[in-house]
Amino acid sequence: MITIDTPLKSKDYRSDIEPTWCPGCGDFGVVSAITKVMSELQLDPDNVLTISGIGCSSRLPLWLKSFGFHSCHGRALPVAVGAKLANPDLTLFVTIGDGDMFSIGAGHVPHSARRNFDMNVFCMDNSLYALTKNQTSPTSREGRKGSLNPYGNLDKPINPIELMVTYGATFVGQSYTGNLKHTTEMIRKATLHKGFSYITLLSPCPTYNDEETFKYYKPKVYDINEEGYKDTSNRLKALEMAQKAVEHLYNKDAKVPIGVFYQSEEPVFNTKLDKLKTQYETRYGSAVKPDWNKVFDRYKA
Ligand code: SF4
């Protein structure tokens, strides 16, 4: 993480481009929280890269005054992996939607997580595809009506928290964008964590989602860490706690847990790569580089 000596205010990290999100969109809370954290941690904007896929949430890099990459649908993670390999010192944010991440991009998720790349993935979950005007997504509840299924969703929702713990992410949490203080705190913790950090940000879409609204979440959310869940390094306990994250999608009286579900300290991928480079250099000397043409020739017919 590269910092600056002269602190910038959070507004200094905002670009001059006006957000095109609908008034009242939950995603506004995410951009506010990210810029607050950038300011608190005095991040050098020249060393911050925000990568997104496609969707309402994926417009976010445009509103930041730092580097950004608005990539293809579902491909934010492989782009982020490439950037991290090329420049390990970057502070990397990935802003992505629930459909983008867990449907078309789902194949990239386990491999980025299990390799423990040092990046921060914020999944802005509004339980639907909003940019394409209201289709059900992998996190939509069963029975939810969308533009392509007027009789209701036939599929069960996935559980992102359970998946991310299983895939080997070393920081897994959830927040709700209607609570700016909590969202900021979670983004700060994720950014300070060295390794693959994942947060589900429950982010209401007032234009298309009349079920999971601010009014719906406000009385339901509770902070699991404040309520005694402290042993966040225990994977089995995290998986048990993760079951509570989707309970409200089946039972209308269930609460919605937010906070840190899992955190562990493990070597990041770039450190392992550096070790490999050292092993190579010890064996062949730092001046000896592989003859790539010779290597490629082996694969030619
Ligand atoms: Fe936000 Fe929904 Fe509007 Fe997209 S359609 S900008 S998610 S409120």
Image: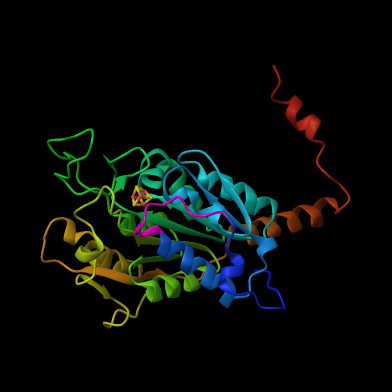
Q: Residue furthest top?
A: 301
Using the image, determine if residue 228 lies above or below residue 253: below
- Quadrant of the frame with the N terminus: bottom right
Residue nearest the viewer, comparing 51 with 150: 150
Residue nearest the viewer, comparing 3 with 23: 23
**Residue drawn 59% across the image and 47% down it:** 69
18 part of magenta stretch: yes
- Quadrant of the frame with the C terminus: top right
Q: Tell me where the magenta segment starts and ends, as one range.
A: 17-27
Using the image, determine if residue 54 lies above or below residue 226: above
**Residue drawn 11% across the image and 61% down it:** 252
**Residue drawn 64% across the image and 50% down it:** 83
**Residue drawn 26% across the image and 82% down it:** 227
* Residue 113 appears left or right of 231: right
42 part of magenta stretch: no
Q: Position of residue 76 (x, y in %)?
A: 51, 46
Would residue 138 be visible to someone looking at this image?
yes
Q: Main secondary structure of the magenta part?
A: loop
Residue nearest the viewer, comparing 52 with 192: 52
* Residue 147 appears left or right of 298: left
Q: Position of residue 175 (x, y in %)?
A: 35, 67
Q: Position of residue 8 (x, y in %)?
A: 64, 74
Q: Position of residue 185 (x, y in %)?
A: 44, 75
Using the image, determine if residue 143 lies above or below residue 122: above
Quadrant in which residue 203 is drawn: bottom left
